Amino acid sequence: MGTRSRPLEIVDRTPAIGSEIRTDLETLLSGREAETIRATLERRGVVFFRGLDISDEQQVAIANTLGSIVQNEGEGGIYKISLDTTVNQRAEYLKGSMFWHFDGSLQPYPNLATLLRAMKLSDSGGQTEFCNTYAAYEDLPDADKEAIAELRVVHSAERSQYYVRPEMSYDEITFWQKSPTKSCPMVWTHQSGRKSLLLGATADYVIGLPVEESRALLARLRDWATQPHYVYRHEWQPGDLLIWDNTGTMHRALPYAADSGRLMHRTVLAGEEPLN
Ligand code: OGA
Ligand code: MN
């Protein structure tokens, strides 16, 4: 160890989002390049490492060089993402991940970043798509920027469930309504000064707008932010370790079968910026 480490080689996959970082495991574990990796993550939205034989413990160790891990999900910092209820009891809820979202929209501090490692892939589907919500905001026409500058959006767990179960029963609706809702700005002004669009499957309605206008605006902005030139689609290979900046992107899994065996090991980095 220690003799063959090399600097990072960063290979952009699309102009606006997504880079492969080529390096070796020893460099990643040492934390020597952690600052560069974090800066690359913020600049590129998504980074991934391919061809490294990474264990669960090493995934957690790498995460620890980048931030502080959210410990309350999974065992030992690893949470299993699977649609198979024998692997993950919340599999039904995870179906919501097939629609554009960011993680932790209902939390005071949305997650900083998520690490996902491909343990087993689906024979078909199961790619993950990401869009750059910084770039999408920056490119908006000035009239739109002005119109949405002060808008606030109510996010709810209930709203995101309609994507998965369009005809929920009264009991189901009242169950989801027990989760508190959260009002978020439509434009997130980060501590860095950069701004990003804040949308996603939990976005229920815009405060103060008629319902039709509110729904139309949320859909129009999602269409805008998910145009092909803001999107990177990750075609997984076994063992890939991918990290997304959860504060400047949205993501979704492309459909795959619940019995496909697809399994991802996830580690989450705690948010460092409040979203008020
Ligand atoms: C997640 C998520 C997408 C995927 O883990 O938060 O949305 O492709 N995963 O599994
Ligand atoms: Mn997610």
Image (tube, rainbow, N blue to C red):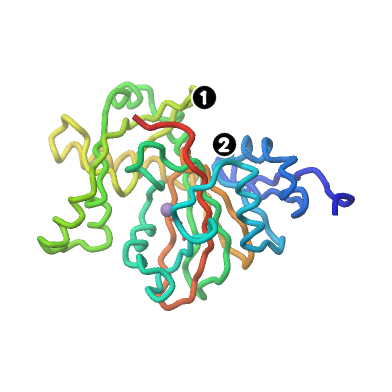
Which of the pair 107/9 is nearer the observer?
A: 107
Q: Which amino acid does label 2 sit on?
A: Glu
Residue in the foreground of this view, choosing between 219 and 31: 31
Q: Of marks 2 and 1, which one's residue comes earlier in the chain?
A: 2
Instruction: Report x, y in % for residue 190.
Output: 46, 27
Answer left or right for 230 relative to 163: right
Q: Regarding mark 1 in the picture, which secondary structure is present there?
A: loop
**On screen, 151 above or below 237?**
above
Residue 39 spot, x, y in % from top left: 63, 35
Verify CB contact (< 8 Å) between mark 2 and mark 1: yes
Indicate the quadrant where residue 144 lies: top left
Q: Which mark is residue 215?
A: none
Give the residue displayed 52% in from the left and 75% down from the top.
123
Give the residue drawn at x 51%, y 69%. 263
Quadrant of the frame with the N terminus: bottom right
Mark 1 neighbour density, 10 Å: few (under 14) some (14–19) many (20 or more): few
Q: Is residue 174 left or right of residue 7?
A: left
* Residue found at x 29% / y 47%: 202
Residue found farthest to the right: 3
Q: Which amino acid does label 1 sit on?
A: Ser
C-alpha distance separating marks 2 and 1: 10 Å
7 vs 37, left or right, is: right
